[in-house]
Amino acid sequence: MYSKYFMVDDLEHQEKNDQLVILSDSLKAMKAMKDASVDLIFADEPYNLGKDFGKGKDSWSSTESYIDWNKQWISEAMRILKPDGTMYVMSATQFMPFIDIYVQKDYYVLSRIVWTYDSSGVQSKKMFGSLYEPILMFTHSKKSKFTFNAKDIMVEAKTGAKRKLIDYRKNPPQPYNTKKVPGNVWNIPRVRFRMDEYENHPTQKPEKLLERIIKASSNPGDVVFDPFAGSFTTGAVAERLGRKSISIDIEPEFYKIGLRRLGIADSYKGEKLVKEKKRKTHNLSKQAREKKNKKDQPEQLGLFEND
């Protein structure tokens, strides 16, 4: 699988059953990938919030340098995305507007999704606590014939009825179809320590979130690509749903999670790979991150000039 999608042979990788994991800087690896080679991209990028990802970078010298880096990797990602493919990007709430503006210039935005979750742990007393993360869904152009499997992601509509509604016009009477395609506000619980899917990663995304994205925007046998794999949820869900996957991470500890979670290897460099739950993390406190970000707020105008 590796040789089919990459133009170099010097990236550390392992694969099994059409699931490929790579230990590398994401931008370096993407530059080595072939044009128009993947069907769906999900990218939960570093948020520039100063979190601890080991070798992975989550802090840039300025907002401008962070946005410039975004332009580079998004451009590479869109190069390897097929003409009718779809890309989903997650970023911090304060940076997504700048990414959105850049994407609008060169590509076509399909939806702006809000992932909202429960309030436990968010106890701000000086402002409204943040209970959501934005997701930008886009494709190459308005003419792209992108995949959207509405029937595969239907959810139960909230009718307010205490009992199932029956259509007596039919013979025999049948329950009304109360299924609908979800809107762009997704209420999906975050991953908790007690959950079976929990991995030792500070920003793990829930499997239900990736299930909806992968079911909606790809078909069995398609290639799903995640350039910032982290806990390798994208690859794990893609495999379960009958898709192929390519997942990249620069941090060896997370790479080992991918090897184990996708069933590719049970050991790495003599170390047996077993799942050990640990509480998170060595990250900066919310107050420390807010203080850092306040010092580095960009000017609202001119950030995207002279591109």
Image (tube, grey):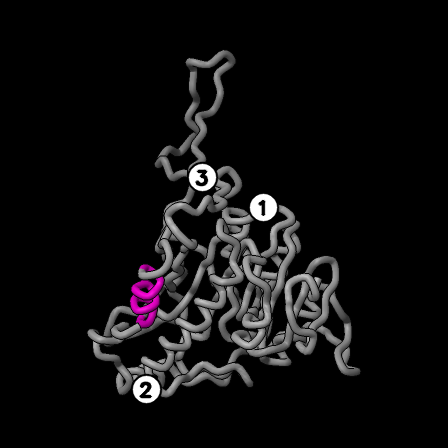
Vertical relation: 251 (above or below) 136: below
Q: Does the image show residue 99?
A: yes
At x 36%, y 35%, the residue is 159
Horizontal side of 83 relative to 70 (left or right) equals right
Residue to which mark 2 is pinned: 292
Q: Which residues are magenta?
A: 94-104
Q: Amino acid at mark 1?
A: Asn
Secondary structure state at the residue bearing disc 1 = loop
Three-letter amino acid code at disc 2? Answer: Lys
Contact, mark 2 vs mark 1 (Cβ under 8 Å): no
Does residue 168 lie above or below 150 as drawn? above
Q: CA distance from mark 3 to mark 1?
A: 23 Å
Residue shown at 49% from the left, 52% from the top:
83
Corner quadrant of residue 4: bottom right
Mark 3 and mark 1 lie on one chain; the one further toward the N terminus is 3
Q: Answer whether residue 98 is magenta in the image.
A: yes
Pointer 1 residue: 219
Mark 2 or mark 1, earlier in chain: 1
Question: Residue 254: x, y in percent?
Answer: 61, 76
Secondary structure under tag 3 reads: strand
Q: What kind of element bears circle 2?
A: helix
Q: Quadrant of the N terminus?
A: bottom right
Structural crowding at the residue carrying mark 2, measured as other residues with C-alpha within 10 Å and reported as few (<14), some (14–19) or many (≥20) = few
Q: Which residue is mark 3?
A: 156
Residue 235: x and y in percent read 61, 61
Residue type highlighted by circle 3 = Glu
Q: Residue at x 41, y 44 (%)?
A: 182
Residue at the (45%, 35%) spot, across then down: 179
